[in-house]
Image (cartoon, rainbow, N blue to C red):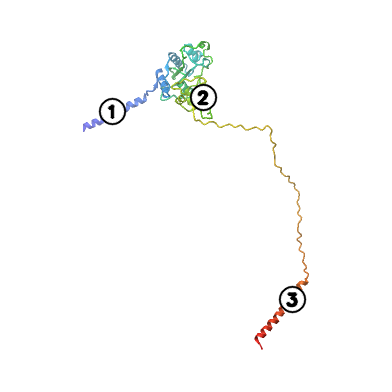
């Protein structure tokens, strides 16, 4: 009996220890972001979930992201402006980063920043980064490299994610130093042209002309399709690179807009015909009786023909009576 009690007590203690261990695990989530490497892994995990390749860490981007996180923690401000008022593009070029794209528009680069009172828990994209522009920073296929930085200030933790694209040959553009990214506003997080949807053609095909700064991801989101579908419709294979002016078939079998049939305009206005309404005047109407209904006594004059007929009728009656009497008398007394 004691042995049974001992076994039950042991099982109970094991259950209590297991529950305490699970509570400790839940209280200390493993997806807390406390290092730059964890933040990069979270972003690349998001890209892989969309079928996009991971971005490669670049030392210059690691430097720009960490310095910006430190600057925000020191000033207590969430800003894209660098110390001295320079822009993100100007900082990249000054550090020798071979930035691709139109440098007068800032080039192909983007930055996401935020402040959290506690360490950031990545159980999905943070709410501050769920709009199109911030998602584009992490998902655009135009970018090839990434850097991240985390710094703790007096009122919380400051995070920065820097992404950018390098030139094809890895060399800085010849006009980089002269241009210096002067066309970029200091507070703009990234350059991305909003996608304006095209209407379907008569055959149901929807063709989109790629604009500067647009990506397959932003185009797919706007048209309600996927990157894989666009790649298949355009025989792109696994290629994610699109260029300005490229025409992409994004949808098939869409409903074309209704035909706008113009209404012919009349050069000479037709006269407006209104019905003629007779004018009524208050004229008294008098009625003249058509018949004279005055009772006039009628006088009847005797006619001679009527008198003769009555006399003849009387004679015939008398004759009939006489003849009838004689016939009766003869029958009764034949002698």
Q: Is residue 98 above or below residue 280?
A: above
- Sequence-first tag of 1 and 2: 1
Q: Distance of mark 3 from mark 2, alpha carbons?
A: 126 Å
Depth check, front residue: 27 or 242: 242
Q: Is residue 317 above or below residue 159?
A: below
**What mark, if any, has residue 14 been given in the picture?**
1
Depth check, front residue: 165 or 153: 165
Q: Residue 119: tell me if it is visible.
A: no
Task: Answer few, some or many: residues within 10 Å of disc 2's Cα (few below 14, many 20 plus, some between 14 and 19).
Answer: many
x, y (%) of residue 120?
A: 42, 22
Residue at 36 percent across and 25 percent down: it is 27
* Residue that mark 2 sits on: 208
- SS at circle 2: strand
* Circle nearer the viewer, 3 or 2: 3
- Sequence-first tag of 3 and 2: 2
Residue at 39 percent across and 22 percent down: it is 32
* Circle nearer the viewer, 1 or 2: 2
**What mark, if any, has residue 228 been given in the picture?**
none
**What mark, if any, has residue 312 been given in the picture?**
3
Q: Distance of mark 1 from mark 2, alpha carbons?
A: 63 Å
Q: Distance of mark 1 from mark 3, alpha carbons?
A: 156 Å
Depth check, front residue: 5 or 329: 329
Q: Is residue 18 left or right of residue 36?
A: left
């Amino acid at each position: 009996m004691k042995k049974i009690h001992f076994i039950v007590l042991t099982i109970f203690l094991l259950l209590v220890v297991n529950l305490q261990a699970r509570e400790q695990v839940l209280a200390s989530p493993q997806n807390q972001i406390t290092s730059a490497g964890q933040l990069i892994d979270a972003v690349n995990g998001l890209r892989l979930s969309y079928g996009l390749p991971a971005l490669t860490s670049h030392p210059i981007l690691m430097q720009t992201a960490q310095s910006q996180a430190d600057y925000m923690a020191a000033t207590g401000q969430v800003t894209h402006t660098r110390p001295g008022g320079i822009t993100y593009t100007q900082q990249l070029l000054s550090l020798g980063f071979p930035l691709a794209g139109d440098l007068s528009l800032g080039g192909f680069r983007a930055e996401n920043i935020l402040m959290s009172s506690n360490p950031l828990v990545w159980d999905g994209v943070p709410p501050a980064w769920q709009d199109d522009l911030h998602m584009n920073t992490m998902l655009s296929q135009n970018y090839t490299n990434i850097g991240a930085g985390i710094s703790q200030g007096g009122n919380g933790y400051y995070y920065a994610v820097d992404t950018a694209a390098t030139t094809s040959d890895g060399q800085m553009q010849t006009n980089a130093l002269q241009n210096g990214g002067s066309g970029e506003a200091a507070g703009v997080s990234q350059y991305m042209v909003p996608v304006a949807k095209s209407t379907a053609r008569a055959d149901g095909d929807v063709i989109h002309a790629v604009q500067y700064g647009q990506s397959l991801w932003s185009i797919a989101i706007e048209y309600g399709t996927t990157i894989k579908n666009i790649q298949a419709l355009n025989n792109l294979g696994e290629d994610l690179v699109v260029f300005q002016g490229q025409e992409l078939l994004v949808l098939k079998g869409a409903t074309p807009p209704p035909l706008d049939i113009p209404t012919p305009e009349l050069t000479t206005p037709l006269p407006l015909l209104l019905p003629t309404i007779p004018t009524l005047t208050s004229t008294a109407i008098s009625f003249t009786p058509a018949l004279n209904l005055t009772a006039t006594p009628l006088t009847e004059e005797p006619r001679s023909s009527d008198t003769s007929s009555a006399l003849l009728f009387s004679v015939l009656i008398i004759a009939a009576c006489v003849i009838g009497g004689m016939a009766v008398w003869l029958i009764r007394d034949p002698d």
